[in-house]
Amino acid sequence: GFARVDFHRERRKEFAEVIFAQNKTPEETALIAQKLYERHGRFLATRVSKDHFDAIKKLIPAATYNERAQTSACYQEGDPRPGTPLIITAGTSDLPVALEAEETLKFAGFKPLTLFDAGVAGIHRLFASIDLIRKADVIIAVAGMEGALPSVVAGLVSCPVIAVPTSVGYGANFQGLSALLTMLNSCAPGIGVVNIDNGFGAAALAISILGLKEK
Amino acid sequence: GFARVDFHRERRKEFAEVIFAQNKTPEETALIAQKLYERHGRFLATRVSKDHFDAIKKLIPAATYNERAQTSACYQEGDPRPGTPLIITAGTSDLPVALEAEETLKFAGFKPLTLFDAGVAGIHRLFASIDLIRKADVIIAVAGMEGALPSVVAGLVSCPVIAVPTSVGYGANFQGLSALLTMLNSCAPGIGVVNIDNGFGAAALAISILGLKEK
Amino acid sequence: GFARVDFHRERRKEFAEVIFAQNKTPEETALIAQKLYERHGRFLATRVSKDHFDAIKKLIPAATYNERAQTSACYQEGDPRPGTPLIITAGTSDLPVALEAEETLKFAGFKPLTLFDAGVAGIHRLFASIDLIRKADVIIAVAGMEGALPSVVAGLVSCPVIAVPTSVGYGANFQGLSALLTMLNSCAPGIGVVNIDNGFGAAALAISILGLKEK
Amino acid sequence: GFARVDFHRERRKEFAEVIFAQNKTPEETALIAQKLYERHGRFLATRVSKDHFDAIKKLIPAATYNERAQTSACYQEGDPRPGTPLIITAGTSDLPVALEAEETLKFAGFKPLTLFDAGVAGIHRLFASIDLIRKADVIIAVAGMEGALPSVVAGLVSCPVIAVPTSVGYGANFQGLSALLTMLNSCAPGIGVVNIDNGFGAAALAISILGLKEK
Amino acid sequence: GFARVDFHRERRKEFAEVIFAQNKTPEETALIAQKLYERHGRFLATRVSKDHFDAIKKLIPAATYNERAQTSACYQEGDPRPGTPLIITAGTSDLPVALEAEETLKFAGFKPLTLFDAGVAGIHRLFASIDLIRKADVIIAVAGMEGALPSVVAGLVSCPVIAVPTSVGYGANFQGLSALLTMLNSCAPGIGVVNIDNGFGAAALAISILGLKEK
Amino acid sequence: GFARVDFHRERRKEFAEVIFAQNKTPEETALIAQKLYERHGRFLATRVSKDHFDAIKKLIPAATYNERAQTSACYQEGDPRPGTPLIITAGTSDLPVALEAEETLKFAGFKPLTLFDAGVAGIHRLFASIDLIRKADVIIAVAGMEGALPSVVAGLVSCPVIAVPTSVGYGANFQGLSALLTMLNSCAPGIGVVNIDNGFGAAALAISILGLKEK
Amino acid sequence: GFARVDFHRERRKEFAEVIFAQNKTPEETALIAQKLYERHGRFLATRVSKDHFDAIKKLIPAATYNERAQTSACYQEGDPRPGTPLIITAGTSDLPVALEAEETLKFAGFKPLTLFDAGVAGIHRLFASIDLIRKADVIIAVAGMEGALPSVVAGLVSCPVIAVPTSVGYGANFQGLSALLTMLNSCAPGIGVVNIDNGFGAAALAISILGLKEK
Amino acid sequence: GFARVDFHRERRKEFAEVIFAQNKTPEETALIAQKLYERHGRFLATRVSKDHFDAIKKLIPAATYNERAQTSACYQEGDPRPGTPLIITAGTSDLPVALEAEETLKFAGFKPLTLFDAGVAGIHRLFASIDLIRKADVIIAVAGMEGALPSVVAGLVSCPVIAVPTSVGYGANFQGLSALLTMLNSCAPGIGVVNIDNGFGAAALAISILGLKEK
Ligand SMILES: Nc1ncnc2c1ncn2[C@@H]1O[C@H](COP(=O)(O)O)[C@@H](O)[C@H]1O
Ligand SMILES: Nc1ncnc2c1ncn2[C@@H]1O[C@H](COP(=O)(O)O)[C@@H](O)[C@H]1O
Ligand SMILES: Nc1ncnc2c1ncn2[C@@H]1O[C@H](COP(=O)(O)O)[C@@H](O)[C@H]1O
Ligand SMILES: Nc1ncnc2c1ncn2[C@@H]1O[C@H](COP(=O)(O)O)[C@@H](O)[C@H]1O
Ligand SMILES: [Mg+2]
Ligand SMILES: [Mg+2]
Ligand SMILES: [Mg+2]
Ligand SMILES: [Mg+2]
Ligand SMILES: [Mg+2]
Ligand SMILES: [Mg+2]
Ligand SMILES: [Mg+2]
Ligand SMILES: [Mg+2]
């Protein structure tokens, strides 16, 4: 029969404990977190508002909250997994998206490097950190406004670059469309793009890429 | 001084011999191909029309042409590099884009697996090949129309999935916009998206991912 | 004369008692509900906020409110009409739209089946319910984000599938545009699409389809 | 095991013999037509150019061509199936799309009624045929430009209306976008929309709806 | 010199006393109203919020407020000017836009006829009032959602029809874009379109048209 | 009964003899022209290609062709109707659209004034003709690129201004979208907009406006 | 080594002390302002809300706030720099954007001329100030709605015109898109466009242009 | 009177002899060129096809043609005007747009510097020419695809940067929209943007900027 073919086993194991809270009520979110926590001893929730966290906290007192990342979690750190992800942002306003990625990577057992506020308008900031950049096995490049950062980064390294457009900007930015189109049209080879503001998705792709080190 | 810092060394080595012919005249393309061929003993050109190839052929008689992939190349196959890329397409119309990716992967030294015409409207075609799919280190999923293939594939595996929207379709497809948005909004974690019809870019990302196996 | 040709008789009889509250004040809505209730002994209102309902409640104390569906109604259930509609959602966030459809179908005298949170990223959830799916005379498939659910469902059945895109998602989702385009471009035959978040419209189409069973 | 679950049996049987020629070479199209014709004794192809048909004709001399519908077919008419589909167009320019729908319905065994050039700018044309319109079990309403026809039709009947926007028009029509949006936003209940110019898809939905008469 | 050529005299005289309050503070609006009132003995302001009106009221105690039209005015009615404008709306939700037009026409000295909630989904409502419709010298047709009303109206009369799309609707309505495109693409001759929700602009055009009666 | 109410009588009489050739074959166009010519002794066709005209010429040897306007016609000029329409264009590239309007006005019996190549970038050209402009009862202002002409014109006169955006331009013009949006957002009161490149529609609106002079 | 090449020296010196507060918390903004003030004895912040300013005021008591410009600053005026910038707005609603530009120019040491509420619908207002306009070395033209002002201005002068679209308007204005497209498509030579509502950017460009006077 | 105020004198003198041939017939273009050549002894035409040039050549035998720039001209070089414009392109495909700018600058009497194929994906190419870049009084930065070049350039200099998006690219480039949005959203101060592919417009802005050196 059908049910015995476990199609969903592989990928699911990695992300089964991550909750997307945005479209859920605080109560729903807290209940799912509790269920996951009881079954697996761990959970991570993204897009968690203060209200969401208050509800979680009541059911899981040990849960923590990263307000800027809008994530809540409860898990025990194990030995770090092999592989070095690096998160770079163009500006300080891109931080929440970068931190969502960072929290997801940590939850998955990685120790991400970070380099914030290194946008291309002042390109010396990027070059000053070239040694750090060269250490990475995979780079998550987060940028709003014109979103040129991933193009420049991908011209400097040979590892895969995950481009995350953010909705930071105004006017002809059209809520991140500008940065999204920039990244999709990059002349630099080796770039994969995720949805606007999708720090979680960038981390998820980084994790599946780093998985090659363990095969 | 500045010039001695070789910023561009790393990635460049991988793609220095690839020519994007689309916006070049046949003569320009042939001359660049010849120059690369003389210096490196190899070249690959993408978006190569019949006219482009005729010009190349005059200067490099050993050059070959893959008409459907719209690529021309001349190189000696070496020992295959480690790592298994798989290219899946939703329909037969997506073939040119898939073949551009395949030619690029071969040029870079990989032996890509392929699974064509496996779209989600007849999802049994995908499931019948589940063993093949599970062999891949990285999957390039190519689809036009509604572009749902990468979502389904990424739900079945844990390796990274590179999603390539194609311009195949009509009406509300808006030259590939529909498939592009589908892929960017996928609920399935582990997907990176490239530009519409960008088979080369998908291969370039796959190559940088597979590079982790050689580190 | 003109007025004696009753053009509007047929369809009108089915939906004359349904109020679209969104652009009406609570007082207007309540007054219309009361007028319909007095004339027909029944009414249904959609897009009903808490304020709307409070006003209705004052005039029709027997009226009920489904907060998640945002519907209010008052009617007596009769014998169920022939035909089996099934409502499927991709995620829990699509629930309000699905429930609007469910309430409309119930009001029209049908007994809808439901299958919630069965999105394609974890396609086993859908297949586990294949027997339920095959029972349907018409299926309402509700999905946000990339909106791939109707494509997969329509590949599994021969009955008509009504696709409802929802505005659930963020970034390149563009308030439901992504799911809408996906559904319009579906390769799977047998799909009709309604407006974003239009649970009522999906039910209305299902009702007119199920009407064929009574002809 | 998996292969024995025949997920795709139901819907597939209806449309297995229909070829979408648009993105295929004449030779590919002819070969697929021949294969289908040998196995099932019948085939239908849509979006068939003159070149496509010439290639088909060589392999299947009995094949016919409807140039305006851009369809080619070869099959034996059987007894008509129960159910009355009606195809209405707003203008003569919408004919090719309407004829694609008509040919598909005929191939599936139905005898469609037709009412062409009955757009809303001269609404008397529609009303003059009110008796014909009332005979239908399902109506396919085809319109370009502002696309208001399905709204008016759905206000006159209680059967399901399938709305097909066409790319007929210019300027702010944006290749059919105008008619598409009109149809999706219709105030009249009982409308399902298909892709721009998708006469085949409209017929496919009509067929699955009419299937209820045979259950 | 330049200043003596009074380019702006003609049109200006008609609309010099109309204030667009939307982007002004209550205080600014009130001050401009007062200045106009002192100089001309009359004023009209559109897009007037309750706060705006409170500020006006303090300076011009005789000023009145039409809350639904969002207009405030103070003037003495004179003898009606020749010409019969008619305002038709598709639904009750289009009322505020229609009332802005009505107030502007009254301020200019006209006596507009009105016909509200006469949308095309129940086209009998329109036909029942055919005699009223035929009385008009110019018709302002206001509609949201799919916006088909002006097309149908323009098919019934020979006078000019001014089409006003409204932002009433949701989803693929895109804040009035759907109705706007419908109106621009109308097959019916004799239609001029104004901006979304621009009741004032429709009245201004009607007034300049009716001016021909006085030439 | 219904048929006796002649809803379509009024407007129809004005435009019954105008053919929109764009989506018709030469043969169809010629046959319709012939039928109209036989019944009414006159016809006008717009969007007429050379091929269209050749077919018309065979059936109606007296037919004439205005190649730049893309119109063909055959009728006898009568006494001019009262009312003075004026057509202004911003540039010479807007001529075909302006001429389509001019031919339509002539066919309807008017004697249009014209003022071509008077765009706002060299605003002195407009002012030099201020006396001509002030003569008009209705103005058709035709402009591509940024489309600012109608705004400036409407600031100088009190008669109605019909704004026709053209697709003249490139890049961020988006085939006339830029001029269309400019005209819809004009600050100057008294403007009605028609579809991009719709010279016929502008004339049709002008004709229905000038009809007030004959009431 | 790299760090000694001071790539960023030149432009940076001009704008190093300007803070973009919009995406920063009040605390962050105040701390950065303080740091700049300590190092350079001056700072300017744009997009400063009342909350931002309160936080700044606590750390820098001498800081001033321009509420309408949404700027805060603290610096000593020096001798004016050579060069005459002029800021023109179409309407009073465009004032905040114009004032942001003015404050930036003053901070950079210039004495900007201003001409507000001079839009093209009443073009005499512009011409009445022709002498002022001719004095400018560079003009910043700020306009919302249809945004035609820069076209007309650039037709009157030979100095560079910086066009700033604003988001003032409604409906088909699409938050400034209309004015943006108008300005990009202007027929008048000598115009450079900046982002919607970007008064700062316009001033920054003006400053770099005026820099030529000091070379 | 009006005519004596010569509003158009200033800017007009600079560009009176430049023809935009794109929407003109070869004959019209040649006649205008001849008229200008006779009056001023010089002319420049842009967007000139081979057919255009053939017609010009017949009337002005001394006229020259730059096929890649698509310009034709006839004039005598005078002494160079003060000021150093620099044109940089991202790729070789951007050349036609850059050459249109170059020809326009030369025609106006400037000696432009050029730096072609210096895109940001290989940013070392840009830095290797830093001395050349620093020489410029104004820079025209031309780029397609993601269009990041102006951002990086403007981070390196203090002179004004004119950003020209090109339509080079495919897919999500949307005919230059991607590069256009990138440039409008640039974080780097000192950038003015012109229309997609508008090399002439960029030069026109550069010329009006360089005019400050002559004041
Ligand atoms: N911030 C996020 N953005 C997109 N997807 C997410 C995010 N956080 C979690 N997810 C995904 O959402 C899934 C859970 O969705 P749900 O069942 O609706 O809570 C997880 O397995 C993740 O794949
Ligand atoms: N099909 C393609 N799509 C996008 N980029 C490509 C493609 N083929 C080659 N390239 C890139 O183009 C570069 C060469 O560009 P060029 O110097 O303009 O020939 C190579 O290094 C690749 O990075
Ligand atoms: N949620 C909904 N979305 C769209 N249409 C609706 C909805 N609910 C009710 N309607 C329709 O709106 C009509 C009533 O509109 P109204 O007269 O404005 O209350 C009903 O006859 C239904 O056809
Ligand atoms: N609701 C409205 N929409 C568009 N324009 C308006 C509106 N109300 C008034 N106006 C116009 O705005 C002008 C006054 O604008 P202002 O000087 O900004 O108050 C009047 O002369 C009218 O032409
Ligand atoms: Mg920063
Ligand atoms: Mg297939
Ligand atoms: Mg879920
Ligand atoms: Mg017709
Ligand atoms: Mg109603
Ligand atoms: Mg001209
Ligand atoms: Mg004003
Ligand atoms: Mg290159």
Image (cartoon, coloured by chain):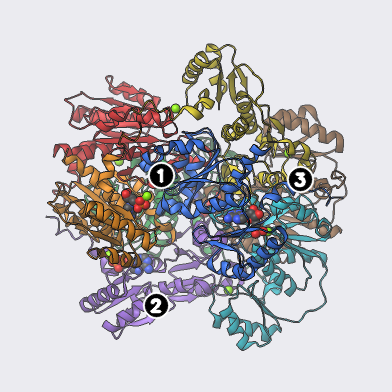
Chain colours: A purple, B green, C orange, D red, E blue, F yellow, G cyan, H brown
Q: Where does label 2 land, which residue?
A: A111
Comparing E1 with F2, the one in front is F2
Does any portion of residue F90 appear in the rendered image?
yes
Three-letter code, disc 2: Lys
Three-letter code, disc 3: Ile
Left/right placement of residue E141 relative to residue F134 reads left
Q: Position of residue A157 (x, y in %)?
A: 50, 65
**What chain does badge 1 belong to?**
E
Quadrant containing the C terminus of chain C is top left
Q: Where does label 1 land, which residue?
A: E119
Left/right placement of residue C205 relative to residue E213 reads left
Which dot marks residue H123? none
Ligand 4, what quadrant? bottom right
Callouts 3 and 1 close, C-beta under 8 Å: no
Quadrant containing the N terminus of chain C is top left
Q: Is mark 1 within 8 Å of ligand 9?
A: yes
Spatial separation of the CA atoms under disc 2 and disc 1: 62 Å
Residue E158's place in the image compared with B190, above or below, is above
Q: Position of residue G197 (x, y in %)?
A: 62, 63
Q: How many marks?
A: 3
Q: Where does label 3 land, which residue?
A: F123
**What chain does badge 3 belong to?**
F
Mark 3 or 2: the one toward you = 3
